[in-house]
Each structure stands twice: as structure tokens, then as C-alpha cells.
Image (cartoon, rainbow, N blue to C red):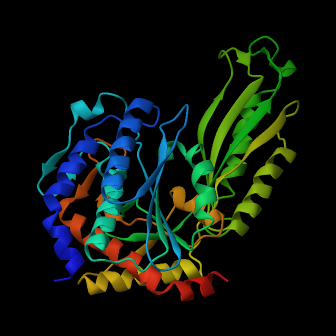
Amino acid sequence: MNQIFFFLESFRKSYLADLATLVNIDCGTHNKVGVDWVGRWIATRCKDWQADVKLMPLTERGDCYVARWRGHGSGKLFIIGHLDTVYPDGTAAQRPMKTEGKKILGPGACDMKAGVLTGLYAMRALQHNDFDSFGEIIYFFNSDEEIGSPASQKLYLPIVKECDAALVLEASRANGDIVSARKGVAHYLIKVKGKAAHAGVEPEKGANAILELSHQIIAAHKLNGIYNGVTVNAGIIGGGTRANVVPDEAHAHVDVRVVDPEGMRAISESIQKLKDNVTVKGTSVEIVGEANFPPMPKNKAGAFLTELAQQAARELNFEVNDAATGGASDANMIAGVGIPVLDGLGPVGGLDHSPDEYIEAESIVPRTALLAELIKKIFENQEKLKQLRG
């Protein structure tokens, strides 16, 4: 049996006890007290396991931490996991961690307390096996990923830019796939200004903003698929005051997903051009918004990271495939600054953000061993990785 796998198997009960500790704490993004509690727990564990730990305080969000392990080799690897969940206060008490058959359920069990622990236990396994053929392994703990990392990314992007590669510890897909590509995300607000009038007495004196917004939404949805992998969705609409008033205002929030930077530029131009085609006389259209997450395409360096993960899995006697997904994560931000990145390296799980969120208990040890072996392979192949980055 692989030595790392054997070590992790012997620590299974410890992992599960730690998982219960973290899952059973309310730590929604806006609960700074809860997120900070989890962060301090993680920081203490990292220090106990011989990392240099730095607190990166935030005022309105939970504090972030960065842990560094230094070896006797060369190269830098960046690992990231997040401390926050989406759940409101009281959820942990209502639904504490439990086991049902082969699944472990609880708020944040999959997204992503198990992933955070997988990173810690992978590092512990590497220490136990005396692996120090690296320059530095940097593990960043993000406090606001569930709302897009607005504060945390300002702290971690300067660090990740100095690294050779990055690994994100979101859960593996429900079928076991790791994530080698993610779509980029942009949000737009379509605002229509019209003219109010009495809808019964003199509607002809008005200009119906809701009617024009309807035309704009139809035009936006016709952009679906106009570029490779592009999706457009009007998800929130509003406008008007009363049924007997011609509405003088209406608006819609539009979500756009793309697979590559070229698609992002093209769809952004197309979205902005919608305002030049007004159908309802007397109305005007304004469109504001921008890309929130850059695309994470599967480039040559990313494909090589995938190959290394697949090699590591085979050596552990299982197979792993990779997938592209429409959802965004910190991996998008990392890809946006040109660093090769692989995601979905936590245990197998699914149904995130729901009462049925789970991880598969039997995936914990294999996936933690996979991460540890992948880390080793990245440092063993760092010269080729640098060549592929160009």
C-alpha cells in the first residue's frame, strides 16, 4: 500500500473529528465571529504542523490566513481553500454533521470544510514521509469566497503571482471528476427609462419602460450560443409602480458565462450594442456591468497539471477524469493572472448550498492521498511546467 495512503488511513478518525468541529460552527460569509473562529482553529493546526502562519485581518469580513511550509528544494506552489459557507446563523445547531450510509452530511461539509482539511492532511502526510523537495508551499485561507472573494482576492493575488502553479480545494464533482476549466462570469444591469402616464386615460402620452425591457431581454437571450460556450440569462427583473400607470422605469440583471477571454470580449461588445436598438418610442436604455470572474480555459499548462493528477490517481489504483464547469471559483481569479491552476481536488461530494449537501466518506482518504501525490509530482516536474507556461 502507498505509504501516504496508509498514513492517511490511520488518521481517518482524526480527520472526521476535525470535520465535525468545523461543520458544526456557523460561519456564513457575513458572520465574522464564526468565520474568525474557524480561521483561528485552522491557524493553530497549521502552526502545530510546522507552518509559518500570518494573520491577514479584514474589518468587514472574516480574517484571512496564509500558511507557509518551506523545504530544501526549489519552486513555489499555491493552495487555496475557503473558511466561509452560505448558511444563515442557527443552521449548524439545526443540522449538525451526521453520517447517512456512505455519505457525510452537514452545512459546509462539501463546500468546503472537507476540502480545507484535505489540504492540511495532505501536507501532514508529506511531512510524515519526509518530503521536502520544494521551495515553498503556500496555503491561503479565504474568508469570503461565497460572495466572490471581493476582499480576499486583493490579499491572495499578489502572493499567487509569485508561484509556479496553484491548486484549489473545492470538492470533486459528484461523479469524481476534477475541474480543469471554468467559465468566466459577467453581470450586467439593463436599465430602461420611459415616461409615466395614466394607463387608462391617456396611455399614448407615456413610454412603457417594461415593454422596452422585454424587447431588450429577448434580444439578450438571442445571444445564447452566438460565441463558443456563451450563455446569457436574465435572472432578475423589476419596474413600474402600479398596474394603471405606464411604467417609467424597468431593469433586469443579466448573467453571462463564457469559456475563454475572446468570448468574454465579444459578448461584452454584443451586450453593450443592445442599447442602440430601442423598439419603444420615447424610451432609452443604459447597460452597466463588467466581467466578475475571468475565464479559466484548459491551456497547455493546465492540461499538464491534469495529466499529473491522473498519473497520481493511477498509482493509487483508481482513475480520475477532468471536467469543465460553468460555475466560478477562486481558480478563475488565479487563471486570470496567468498561473496554471487545477480545481476540484477535495473529496467527492455534491448538493452544495442545500440541506442535503454531502461528501462521500470513502473518498476522503483516496482524494487526500491524490492531493499529496500531485503536490510531489508538481515539484518533480516543475521545469516542464515552466516551459508550458511560456
- The image quarter containing residue 216 is top right
Q: Residue at x 69, y 14 (%)?
A: 244
Residue 341 % position (x, y):
53, 70
Query: In terms of depth relative to the viewer, which is nearer, 180 or 365?
Result: 365
Query: Image height check: is 341 above or below 387?
Result: above
* Residue 268 position by quadrant: bottom right
Residue 222 position in % (x across, y down): 68, 56
Residue that lies at the very extreme toward the left in this rendered image = 101
Q: Is residue 101 left or right of residue 117?
A: left
236 or 51: nearer the viewer: 51
Image position of 172 (left or right of 194) = left
- Where does the image place residue 207, in percent across and percent down from the top left? 82, 26
Query: Which residue appears at 56% of the width and 75% of the height?
Result: 298
Examine the rendered structure and indicate whether residue 134 appears above or below residue 11.
below
Q: Residue 309 at what x, y percent from top left?
A: 39, 79
Please say whether residue 231 is visible from this viewpoint. no
Q: Quadrant of the C terminus?
A: bottom right
Q: Residue at x 21, y 75 (%)?
A: 5
Quick one: quadrant of the N terminus? bottom left
Please indicate, yes or no, whether residue 15 appears anywhere in the rendered image: yes
Q: How many marks?
A: 0
